[in-house]
Amino acid sequence: MSKSDPADLPVVIVGAGLAGLTVALHLAESRPVIVLAKRQLQEAATAWAQGGIVGVLGSDDSIASHVRDTQEAGAGLVDVHTAEFIAQHSARAIEWLVARGVPFSPDPTGPLGLHLTREGGHAVRRIAHAADATGKAIHDVLLDEARRHPNITLREKWMAVDLITNRQVLRKVDRPETYADRCWGVYALNIQTQQVETLPAAAVVLATGGVGKVYRYTSNPDTATGDGIAMAWRAGCRVGNMEFIQFHPTCLYHPTERSFLITEALRGEGALLRLPDGTRFMPDHDGRAELAPRDIVARAIDFEMKKHGLDYVLLDATHLEEAFLKEHFPTIHARCLALGIDIARQPIPVVPAAHYTCGGVVTDLHGRSDLPGLYAVGEATYTGLHGANRLASNSLLECVVLGRTCADHILAQEAVGLAQLPPWDESQVEDADEEVVISHNWDELRLLMWNYVGIVRTTRRLERALHRIKLLRSEIDDYYANFRVTRDLLELRNLVDCAELIVRSALARRESRGLHYSRDYPQTLPVSFPTVLQRKPKRRDAWLP
């Protein structure tokens, strides 16, 4: 066992996106911080966010208006206290980013000198943005600051394996009942050396993002494998609203660019959805047409594709001026042009794709989970903000606001005395002999989730998915127990945990609401509640192995 002075222990943050970096920068003036990134530091999902970040800034806007739009998009499951708290701190969040040097698109006549755009579900223009690459602009600035901070250690190509709780720590301790359960640190795989190290921590923060890679088609980067949600679930934390997976309506349909997102802001500026024959269809599905919330637009596209036997629909921005498109959507214009699509003259082929996880680890407004010492921030969490469907551009805002409150809470805690952590034990395993098992199960899992647990669901499909997930879990658990861990194996293990959570949550909801649409229960109940799952201990003394 390793021993450390609790006062000297770092805070370990798993994930280097906006949530993780926000927590790190707020902590670093007072505490040492280790940030783990399982791939390149630039590969966080934040860098893929195009649209922007909400700020209640304009004279035509108000906290009440933003909360109202959040509630409407969330289809009756938004926690009002959470929505109000986030909205109240939105201006401060924007100001903090501006102070860091984030190059938001300017407008001398706008609040804070910023150009504000509008997206689906918003009553007014309130989205601060950096052209059409807001996430990358924010991420680049914060990552550069973190790199230069002496109290922040960035570990690239390190992946958390599992959280260290009383289950591991107290195996050899007399009178284990004298220790309250908590998170003491994390086992982490150095992907370059393939060695697992034990990292003691004053606190662990999960900022690992969502579960988009559990689906065959997604707008998410390869990092989105639900690692934090799965680790927290295995550690005994509650998980909420996992049935609500947001499918972004407009992901580019192209054989070589399956993950390129066409931002919702393009529809906010007037782009129209059409069938291949030019027919506009959104007004037939919702009075708000192209500016309806994402769940409605995604279902409408799915309906039209199935009705007409289409592989895609078209997003038409050709009536917008070319200069306007180049100025406000330079990334999309350039990427599409490189693929042979001139968006000023040709409509863009698009399909829905898994985009955002509206549920996750249950936390409060300080990022606290059920397990003392364990926090979570960002897409890996369920705070009640997103309800049954996330309002566009609320995600980056949640990361900044709750990243700050999470850091404040950690700083207010006293050091905990126990810091004896057992090393990772791989004495009973060997190197894997056939990696094809992992790749095959990965492909099968993502395909069955796409076919059975997608935009439109049925009870029979969900039950079939659950049956197959159980079989896959058995194979994966056996593989995990017998072979040394690799990143691919760990991601597959986490994905199968998250897939089961999604399916069990979907089966528990006997209605259609927001992002969850069931053919067997098409009605929306007059009163509904979040779906919260809690893992039942297998035995009474659950801390034991």
Image: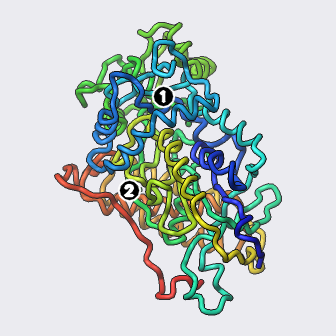
Tell me where residue 458 sits by quadrant: bottom left
| Image point (35%, 16%), residue name | 278
- Local SS, label 2: loop
Q: Is residue 266 left or right of residue 529?
A: right
Residue 350 in the image: above or below residue 23? above
Residue 127 in the image: above or below residue 87? above
**x, y percent for residue 509:** 29, 59
- Looking at marks 2 and 1 on the same chain, the residue that comes earlier in the sequence is marked by 2
Tell me where residue 134 sits by quadrant: top right
- Residue extending furthest bottom? 174
Circles 2, 1 touching at the beta carbon (< 8 Å): no
Work out whether residue 64 or residue 455 is closer to the camera in this orientation and state it: 64
**x, y percent for residue 137:** 62, 29
Work out whether residue 260 or residue 461 is closer to the camera in this orientation and state it: 260
**x, y percent for residue 349:** 47, 25
- Label 2 crowd (10 A; few <14 / some 14-19 / many >=20): many
Whether residue 481 appears in this view of the structure is yes
Whether residue 255 appears in this view of the structure is no
Q: Is residue 248 left or right of residue 135?
A: left
Q: Between marks 2 and 1, how big is the CA–CA gap?
A: 25 Å
| Image point (59%, 68%), residue name | 476
Residue 337 in the image: above or below residue 295? above
Residue highlighted by disc 2: 241
Residue highlighted by disc 1: 263
Q: Amino acid at mark 2?
A: Asn
